[in-house]
Image (cartoon, grey):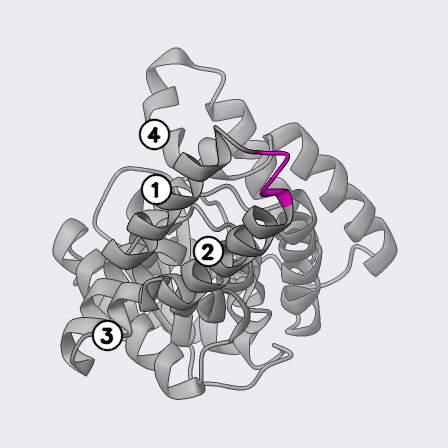
Amino acid sequence: MSAPVAALLAVGLCCAVPAPAQFGGVLGRARQKIEESRQKAKPVTDRAEKAAAIRPWTEEEEQQIGQATAAKMVAMFGVVQEPAVVRYVNLVGATVARQAPRKMPYRFAVLDTEIVGAFALPGGYVFLTKGALLQMENEAQLAGALGHEVVHIAERHLETEIRSKRGSAWAIQEAQAQQLPLDQSIRQRADAFLNDLFNMRLSQDKEDAADREGALLASRAGYTPRGLLTFIERLAQVNQSEENKRLFGQLLSTHPSFESRIQVLQQAVAAAGDRGELLEARFRGAVPH
């Protein structure tokens, strides 16, 4: 609150105590003026935060934020460098992404961590962890998991989710970042996005949609839609061991339960028809366990 507004409010409160009846009309108008002054004196960041909550990113912003966030994730975890694995994951990802409803460059990499997870970043950046890859048994599972993340990006799920939550790191930092030079702004917005990525639970409907549509993307690319279902079933089984629970921290904290996801995917597979390729031998040849 600005000093002039604070002073005006103090005067109004002093008058209101001794003479509410005599000066009711005057005080009412004074309170109105105080509120008008307060609104005019609001920080620019507050107004910018409201605008940020409703204004979608431009394509350029999406690319810049995604690139900066991807660089931070690579710095945090490192990436698997084996050329055969890198090429294989990108080929499978590109095959699935060609079925995506939004056409854009999709890029795929494997984070060098035993944690089981996958991440969809703005601008088409998709990360799968080495821990997740090592839990897979065939190419259809890989295609389904990558399809899930491609749907999140194509539908801009995380962007719309964090804009709906005024208390998110993004909502707080977006307004401040808009006042900075471009390079600083992108870095700050990437930091905020990364914080939300690791801590925010997407709504049930968005996760269900990503599971259903991800399985269908894989199916349209020629894989069995059962791939993502069997992968989630495997994770549910592995998670029953106490020694493995530490591997699933982020996945379980930001996603619906395995049981809920399995139910959704069973319905999706039944609707799509269980046809298509597993390609287990090709997967085993490309991803040594």
- Name the residue carrying label 1: 10
Label 4, label 2: how far apart the Cα atoms are: 54 Å
Does the residue at mark 4 contact the one at mark 2 (Cβ under 8 Å)?
no
Give the mark toward the camera: 1 or 4: 1
Q: Is there any visible trace of residue 284 in the rendered image? A: yes
- Name the residue carrying label 2: 34
Pick whichever of labels 1 and 3 is earlier in the sequence.
Answer: 1
> Magenta residues: mostly which secondary structure?
loop
Where does residue 257 sit, x and y in percent of width and height? 60, 30
Where does residue 255 sit, x and y in percent of width and height? 53, 39
Closer to the camera, 47 or 227?
Answer: 47
Label 4, label 3: how far apart the Cα atoms are: 39 Å
Residue 252 part of the magenta-drawn span: no
Secondary element under disc 3, as helix, strand or loop, is loop
Which image quadrant is residue 171 in?
Answer: bottom left
Label 3, label 2: how far apart the Cα atoms are: 27 Å
- Name the residue carrying label 3: 179
